[in-house]
């Protein structure tokens, strides 16, 4: 049983760009949050400071991990698009196009 597959290179390029934008937005938001909280951090002491630093480390690591996954997904989408395009051109060439 054969199924047709349609690849839209423009959509793949758009998806890759959106993934890159999402990755950049996450980085920007994290930096912004850090900047906004920095002035008040010096006022936190004891358990409040410890809990914040622990939570911040967990958030930062989770966001870093998610950011890396988004970047990897964008790279894979770009690679797949290139591979499909190459296969498409090779297929067309076999028909003398």
Image (cartoon, rainbow, N blue to C red):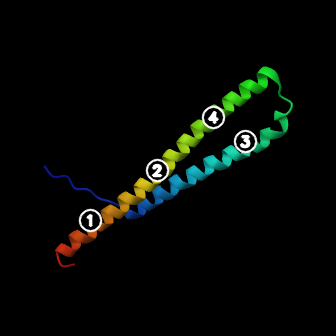
Residue 50 vertical placement versus 84 (above, below): above
Q: Residues within 10 Å of mark 1 (few under 14, many from 20)?
A: few
Question: Which residue: 22% across, 56% down?
Answer: 4
Residue 3 vertical placement versus 57 (above, below): below
- Say which residue label 3 marks: 33
- Which of 14 and 71 lies nearest the eye of the viewer? 71
Mark 4–mark 2 Cα distance, whole angstroms, equals 20 Å
Mark 3–mark 2 Cα distance, whole angstroms, equals 24 Å
- Say which residue label 1 marks: 87
Mark 3–mark 1 Cα distance, whole angstroms, equals 45 Å
Question: Which residue: 56% across, 50% down?
Answer: 22
Residue 34 vertical placement versus 43 (above, below): below
Question: Which residue: 24% across, 70% down?
Answer: 90
In the image: residue 87, left or right of residue 30: left
Mark 3–mark 4 Cα distance, whole angstroms, equals 11 Å
The picture places residue 72, in percent across and down from the top left corner, at 46, 50
Answer with the quarter of the image where residue 56 lies: top right
Q: Secondary structure at mark 4?
A: helix
Q: Secondary structure at mark 3?
A: helix
- Say which residue label 2 marks: 72
């Amino acid at each position: 049983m054969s199924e047709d597959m349609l690849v839209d290179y423009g959509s793949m390029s758009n998806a890759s760009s959106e993934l890159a934008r999402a990755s950049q937005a996450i980085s920007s938001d994290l930096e912004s949050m850090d900047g906004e909280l920095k002035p008040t951090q010096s006022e936190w002491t004891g358990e409040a400071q410890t809990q914040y630093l622990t939570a911040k480390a967990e958030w930062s690591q989770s966001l870093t991990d998610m950011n890396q996954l988004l970047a990897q997904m964008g790279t894979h989408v770009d690679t797949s698009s290139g591979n499909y395009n190459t296969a498409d051109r090779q297929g067309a060439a076999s028909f003398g196009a």
